[in-house]
Image (cartoon, helix red, strand yellow):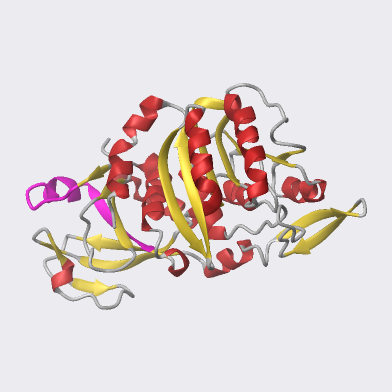
Amino acid sequence: MASCISITGKNIDDYIKDHLVLLFSLRKSRIKAKKLAIMEAYFALYPVGGIFIKNGPLGNLKGVFSFLIPEENMAQALSILPTIGYCNKFYLLDFQTNTPENNSDLKNVSERDLVWKGKAFRISNFYFQDKGIYEKQSVDNRKFIILQNNKEKVVYGYRGDGSEMGRRALPVEDARCMVNLSMPGRAERLLDPFAGGGGIVYSAKYINKKIKVFSVDIDPVVAPGLEFYGSNHFTGDSSRVRFPAAFFDSLVTEVPFSSNATVNIIKAINNLKGSLKKDGRIVLMSSMNQATVLKKAIGDIGFYPYISQKVNRKGTDVAIMGWIKSYDKYKKLQAISSTVKSIS
């Protein structure tokens, strides 16, 4: 199955006869992270056979891109859309019409825009994510349990202890995106070795309720909250904790942003690399200051990069990066990775 294609006037009928075209719109907070959004959508839609369209319709609009979805899998695709992080609005293009028509909430769309490769289409709102669910899952509103004076305490808006090493507040869209980049639909076990306030744990269980999530954090204060979110949690140092070989499908984490933590982060990944399966993935967020060192260190232990992008998080630049352990799987990802990398 192709991961991405270019549509022409000659081949368009071959695709739209049994595929539907779904337009993705990035949420405003991540409008500049289109490359990550496309890769997230690709991995999230992999189980339903989604194909990224390199030269999709309405390319003149900012923050949109398109996928082909097999018509028979559209119901399953619809069940995936609520779990997407970087996009929150989705539109359906109908080519079974001879009249260009905009029945969506998209603005500044002319009749000329509604003709693609010689085919007129109607565009309609298909699915908009529930703002209430997003707000409920946000750090500020999410219930968490901490250990305080040897007693469990329910808190909301937990952001760590405020120290350089203890700031934990991963936004919903970033947590979902990172989990999706690890292909959770095909994963049995996921590990977050720097779990903190549980953003990754929470999103992993939201995206795939069947996935077994494991977490590690050196701070005993967060243990009851991570267990509350459904994690098999271990309090300890990720550079020393032991798990069985080839146990996890993915390692997904937001590392401590302090430059003082970088050496220990590398030690932890070295310690845990053997616990990842032969096609296991690493997806992490770091500060931009840490990114170059971490890229080299993870490459040096035999992992191959398939995505790396800077993201501005309310004025703070961070890096989201992904690697895969299998060289064969890495080569298969080259078509979509190189295509996305070339997007401006």
Q: Is residue 57 above or below residue 333?
A: below
User: In which quadrant will I find the N terminus?
Assistant: top left
- Along the viewing direction, whichever of 160 and 295 lies nearer the viewer: 295
Q: Determine whether, in the image, residue 282 is placed left or right of residue 139.
A: left
User: In which quadrant will I find the C terminus?
Assistant: bottom left
- Along the viewing direction, whichever of 326 and 16 lies nearer the viewer: 326
Residue 327, image quadrant: top left
Q: Position of residue 12 (x, y in %)?
A: 13, 50
Residue drawn at x 23%, y 75% as measured from the top left = 109
Q: Would residue 13 be counted in the magenta stretch?
A: yes
Q: Would residue 212 be counted in the magenta stretch?
A: no
Q: Magenta residues, as a range?
A: 6-25
Q: Position of residue 60 (x, y in %)?
A: 23, 67
- Along the viewing direction, whichever of 322 and 231 lies nearer the viewer: 322
- Is any atom of residue 61 visible in this view? yes
Residue drawn at x 92%, y 50% as measured from the top left = 150
